[in-house]
């Protein structure tokens, strides 16, 4: 038995950077540490183990990591026995470089061996030296690992890990590996386990969710999965992220429209409106195909809120290319957009392309794009004034709510709404109200609540408890006879 199990007083803290996949991985890391006998610390300065779950997508990711490690060094010096672990995509990329640049780090682990963290911490303590372990392929599907969930009312459920795309700006496939799909029954079992603990909403998660089924050779697997999840009693809201326009099919639109639990919200990354830029990005679609998807979604679900990702300043982007992006934004009428200035990432084909743009040019285009999208978001939000909205009450989404006597929640379309507080409302409860005011990035409902439904998720929020899943997946999907259950090696 490990010393962590014998010393339950040891505490941990996990800091998460980057995408939803990292957020969900951090839930797994918390579950692993608690299963090994650790307890959550009140803050970083109080933790015996601090885990940094890193991202490698943005250009300043390295600076952010080493800056945070620099801040932790004096904390560790003042806290004998404290350990620092670094995981995630940047750990997968930089490997031993992290310990060379920050020798006070105790453990470095990659995206493929999340489950090794407790053993690596134990080995680092026993050997009194840093442990760096980066697996080159996925050891076990992350869902075989226990998880301590962040939310009492909403949960992430991975349907796949990795990505088979070759976008020239993206380093994720090199760090997460090729796509691996879970069996549908295992996904549904995890959803059921969350619903059994009161969760009302799940988000199906993958680098490219609508490529789900590639290992089964089943093009309709994702639409079938949406319909099957929609039949789980007690599951009120289903979301998913992120699809890819190249593989997006009409059967998914039909499943969204015909399955009441599936929210009429779609995050559809555009990246660029220029066919030439899309070609150099290796995105596998062009402007007409993208806009065709948007049109078909809106024909089936006129109330759908569509969001997107856009990169400004990709190498070789001309003013004409950028104007094409603005034109797609005008036509698509996105509810919101995550907009990024292109960041050169070593190891990606785009980093070696000719035509790297000056920072000033990229910044000016970025400001034009965000101004346009903010105006569109505001215009679209104003159309909702006077409409009835059902909100799943959220926690921590409104920084000024307390001062203004409000709470916050998410509509079924994913929009954030700040509404008038009333006694007895907890995160995880469901309320109905009427929109009274709109802003580009949120809505306001300052009238009297029309209804308030107390839920088991609200009870859990009030009690301070969170769902836990012990690991419901049984390993990698295969065609034919299932493989034996994977065994976690205690010495790795």
Image (cartoon, rainbow, N blue to C red):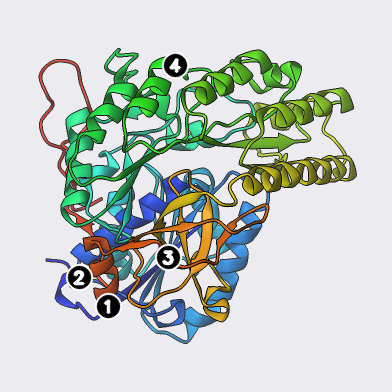
Q: CA distance from mark 2 to mark 1?
A: 8 Å
* Image height of 289 relative to 318, above or below: above
Q: Earlier in the sequence, mark 3 or mark 4?
A: 4
Q: Is residue 14 left or right of residue 17?
A: left
* Image height of 439 relative to 94, above or below: below
Q: Position of residue 119 (x, y in %)?
A: 25, 58
Q: Earlier in the sequence, mark 4 or mark 1?
A: 1
The answer to whether residue 179 of the structure is visible from this angle is: no
Which disc number belongs to residue 449? 3
Q: Quadrant of residue 26?
A: bottom left
Q: Residue at x 32, y 76 (%)?
A: 424
Q: Residue at x 87, y 44 (%)?
A: 364
- Secondary structure of residue under mark 3: loop
Q: Which residue is mark 4?
A: 249
Q: Is residue 185 left or right of residue 88?
A: left
Mark 2 in CB contact with mark 1 (< 8 angstroms): yes
Q: Residues within 10 Å of mark 3 (few under 14, many from 20)?
A: some
Q: Which residue is mark 2?
A: 37
Q: Which residue is mark 1?
A: 10
Mark 3 in CB contact with mark 4 (< 8 angstroms): no
Q: Earlier in the sequence, mark 4 or mark 2?
A: 2
- Secondary structure of residue under mark 1: loop
- Closer to the observer: label 3 or label 1? 3
Q: Position of residue 102 (x, y in %)?
A: 55, 64
């Amino acid at each position: 038995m490990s010393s962590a199990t014998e010393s339950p007083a040891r505490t941990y803290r996990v800091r998460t950077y980057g995408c939803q996949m990292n957020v969900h991985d951090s839930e797994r890391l918390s579950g692993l540490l608690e299963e090994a006998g650790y307890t959550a610390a009140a803050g970083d300065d109080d933790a015996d183990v601090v885990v940094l779950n890193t991202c490698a997508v943005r250009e300043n990711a390295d600076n952010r990591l080493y800056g945070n490690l620099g801040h932790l060094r004096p904390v560790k010096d003042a806290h004998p026995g404290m350990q620092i672990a670094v995981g995630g995509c940047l750990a997968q990329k930089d490997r031993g470089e992290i310990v060379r640049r920050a020798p006070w780090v105790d453990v470095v682990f990659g995206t493929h061996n999340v489950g090794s963290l407790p053993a690596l911490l134990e080995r680092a303590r026993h050997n009194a030296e840093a442990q760096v372990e980066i697996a080159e392929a996925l050891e076990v599907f992350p869902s075989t690992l226990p998880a301590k969930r962040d939310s009492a009312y909403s949960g992430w459920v991975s349907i796949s890990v990795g990505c088979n795309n070759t976008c020239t700006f993206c380093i994720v496939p090199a760090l997460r590996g090729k796509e691996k799909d879970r069996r549908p029954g295992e996904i549904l079992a995890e959803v059921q386990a969350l619903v059994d603990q009161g969760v009302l909403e799940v988000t199906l998660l993958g680098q490219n969710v609508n490529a789900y089924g590639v290992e089964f050779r089943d093009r309709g697997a994702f639409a079938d999965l949406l319909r099957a999840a929609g039949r789980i009693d007690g599951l009120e809201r289903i979301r998913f992220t992120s699809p890819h326009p190249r593989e997006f099919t009409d059967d998914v639109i039909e499943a969204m429209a015909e399955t009441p639990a599936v929210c009429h919200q779609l995050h559809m990354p555009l990246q660029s409106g220029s066919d030439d830029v899309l070609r150099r990005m290796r995105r596998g679609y062009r402007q007409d195909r993208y806009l065709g998807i948007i049109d078909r979604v809106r024909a089936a679900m006129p109330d759908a809120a569509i969001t997107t990702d856009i990169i400004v300043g990709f190498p070789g982007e001309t003013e004409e290319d950028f104007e094409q992006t603005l034109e797609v934004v005008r036509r698509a009428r996105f509810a919101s957009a995550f907009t990024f200035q292109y960041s050169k990432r070593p190891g990606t084909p785009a980093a070696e392309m000719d035509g790297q743009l000056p920072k000033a040019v990229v910044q000016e285009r970025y400001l034009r794009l965000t101004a346009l999208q903010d105006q569109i978001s505001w215009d679209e939000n104003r159309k909702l004034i006077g409409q009835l909205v059902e909100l799943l009450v959220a926690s921590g989404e409104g920084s000024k709510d307390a001062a203004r006597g409000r709470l916050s929640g998410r509509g079924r379309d994913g929009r954030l709404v700040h509404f008038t507080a009333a006694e007895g409302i907890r995160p995880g409860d469901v309320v109905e109200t009427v929109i009274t005011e709109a802003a580009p990035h949120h809505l306001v409902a300052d009238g009297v609540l029309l209804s308030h439904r107390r839920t088991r998720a609200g009870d859990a929020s009030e009690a301070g408890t969170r769902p836990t899943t012990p690991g419901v997946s049984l390993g990698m999907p295969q065609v034919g006879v299932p493989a034996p259950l994977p065994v976690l090696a205690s010495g790795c």
